[in-house]
Amino acid sequence: MPKVSEFDRFGIENMSKEEYEERQRYVLKNCLCPGCPTYVEGDYPYGYCFPPIGTSRKIMHEKECICETCSVYSEYELNHTFYCTRCSQLCQTYKQEVPAGHE
Ligand code: SF4
Ligand code: SF4
């Protein structure tokens, strides 16, 4: 099985609770989701790319994803989209890698 650290872009695996909370605050501060056509007003926390925030409980329909224009996306070299419906960067990469037979 692939190791989490191989695609843990946010480096959460070895973070202390304080470091994790600080990084989460940073992601939320810079997250563009509230201005996205897919976003449903009032859903919180956004920053869906950041594990383990999880997918949205309110967003049911994908319209457009503006993650690729977000500073968090480029800073952490993310490469997926629709984190609100499809799960976090770590989760989507894991799903992609496991069927690829990287064991
Ligand atoms: S990449 Fe997407 S989900 Fe992550 S902080 Fe930016 S807009 Fe939000
Ligand atoms: S993850 Fe992408 S599609 Fe979902 S609300 Fe954020 S920017 Fe929009």
Image: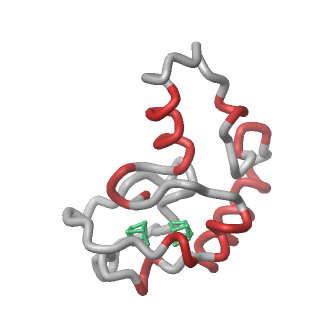
The quarter of the image holding the N terminus is top right
Relative image position of residue 42 (x, y in whole percent): 33, 79
Q: Is residue 25 visible?
A: no
Relative image position of residue 53 (x, y in whole percent): 49, 54
The quarter of the image holding the C terminus is top right
Q: In this image, 21 relative to 93: left or right?
A: right
Q: In this image, 71 relative to 46: left or right?
A: right
Q: How many marks?
A: 0
In this view, 98 is above or below 96: above
How are the residues colored?
secondary structure
At horizontal 61% and vertical 57% (from top left) the residue drawn is 78
Could you say which is closer to the camera, residue 18 or residue 73?
73
In this view, 47 is above or below 30: above
At horizontal 78% and vertical 45% (from top left) the residue drawn is 15
Tell which residue pokes out farthest to the bottom in this image: 35
Relative image position of residue 97 (x, y in whole percent): 52, 29
| Quarter of the image where one finds residue 20 | bottom right
At horizontal 31% and vertical 82% (from top left) the residue drawn is 37
At horizontal 51% and vertical 17% (from top left) the residue drawn is 101
Could you say which is closer to the camera, residue 82 or residue 10?
82
Tell which residue pokes out farthest to the front in this image: 100
Q: In this image, 90 relative to 11: left or right?
A: left
Q: Is residue 41 visible?
A: yes
Q: In this image, 89 relative to 14: left or right?
A: left
Relative image position of residue 75 (x, y in whole percent): 73, 66
